[in-house]
Amino acid sequence: MNVPKPRLGVFKFSSCDGCQLAILDCEEELLPLTEQVAIGEFLEASADVKGGPFDLALVEGSVSTPGEVERVKRVREESKTLVAIGACATAGGLQALRNWDSLGLFQTAVYPHPEYLKCLEKASPISDYVPVDIELRGCPISKSQLMQLFSSVLSGALPRLPGNAVCFECKRRGNSCVVVAGGVPCLGPVTMDGCGAICPSFGRGCYGCFGPSNDVNLESYASWLVSHGTPRPAVRGLVRGINSNSKEFREWLEKDD
C-alpha cells in the first residue's frame, strides 16, 4: 500500500524572493527531499500548482496589502504546519520601515501614481494575522536551519533553533571583536546567531538580519555604544534596519523617541 507523501507548499507575500531562492540554493539537498515530499505549490520553482491541503507550508514575505490578508488566512486554513521564513515574514522586513512614518509620504516619493496602489498602512509579520507554528529568522534564511527544519518536521519533531547572540559565533570562528578591536558599531551582542557571523568575519558590524537574540537588553548595549563614541542617532539608525519591527527592537526605538 502506497502511503501519500507529505504535501509541501511555498508561498510568497511582499518580499524580494531571497528566502525562496535560499531554498533552491540547497541544490543537491533538494533532490532527496523531493523524494520525501510532494510539492503542491512553489511558484518560484515551478508553474505546476497542484494545491493543498498542505502538511507543511513555508511562507515568505510580510503582509502589506488587503489581498495578502485574505490569502494568508487561506494558506493557514489549508496548512497543518505553517512556517514563517525570513525577516519579512517574521518581523515585517524592510517593508516595515514605512511603519515609522506616513505611508503617503513614501508613496508620493516613489510612485508617479500612488492612487493606483492598494496598501495597508503598515507592513506586518505573518503572525499578526494568523497563528505561526515555527519561525526561521534571517535575511535570507540559513540553509542549515532550513534543512534541519525539513528533517525535524518530516520526522514529527520540532527543529532546534539557535537563541544565542552572534558574538557566540564570532568566538567559535576566532574573530576579533569589531567593536572592541576596531570601534565598529555592531548589533552582534543583541542579534540572534544563525548567519555564521558573516559580516564580523569580514570586519563589518552585524546589522541584525536575524533579529533580536533571546534575553536581549538593547537599552544597556545602546548606552554602552554611546559611551564608547557612537552617536545615539547612529545607534538608532543601525537598529532601524531589516528587523526594526521585531518586538524588542521596535519597543526600544519607540521608547527612545
Image: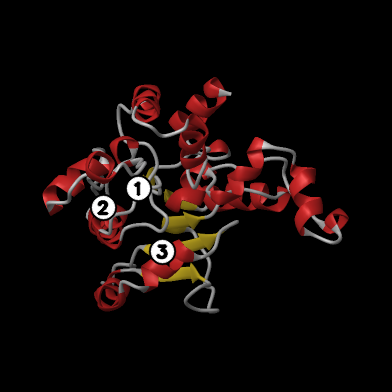
Q: Residue at x 28, y 71 (%)?
A: 33
Is any part of residue 39 visible from this angle?
yes
Mark 2 is surrounded, within 10 Å at the Cα level, by few (under 14), some (14 to 19) or many (20 or more) other residues, namely many
Image coords of residue 135 (percent x, y)? 39, 45
Q: Is residue 73 above or below residue 234?
A: below
Mark 1 is surrounded, within 10 Å at the Cα level, by few (under 14), some (14 to 19) or many (20 or more) other residues, namely many
Image coords of residue 6 (percent x, y)? 35, 63
Instruction: Name the image quarter holding the C terminus.
Output: top right
Residue at the front extreme, as displayed: 229
Depth check: 218 or 78 in front? 218
Identify the mark nearer the N-term, 1 or 3. Answer: 3
Label 1: element kind: loop
Depth check: 79 or 89 in front? 89
Of the residues tagged 3 and 2, which is closer to the observer? Answer: 2
Res. 203 image quadrant: bottom left
Residue indicated by mark 2:
197
Q: Amino acid at mark 2?
A: Ala
Whether pointer 2 and pointer 1 mark residues with C-beta atoms closer than 8 Å, the reply is: yes
Q: How many labels, in total?
A: 3
In 3D space, how far apart are the residues under numbered discs 2 and 1 (Cα atoms)? 8 Å
Is any part of residue 118 visible from this angle?
no
Depth check: 113 or 237 in front? 237
Depth check: 185 or 189 in front? 185
Image coords of residue 53 (percent x, y)? 49, 58
Taking 15 as reference, is 197 left or right? Answer: left
Q: Which mark is residue 206?
A: 1
Q: Residue at x 72, y 40 (%)?
A: 121
Image coords of residue 245 (percent x, y)? 53, 37
Residue indicated by mark 3:
8
Res. 102 image quadrant: top right
Identify the mark nearer the N-term, 3 or 2. Answer: 3
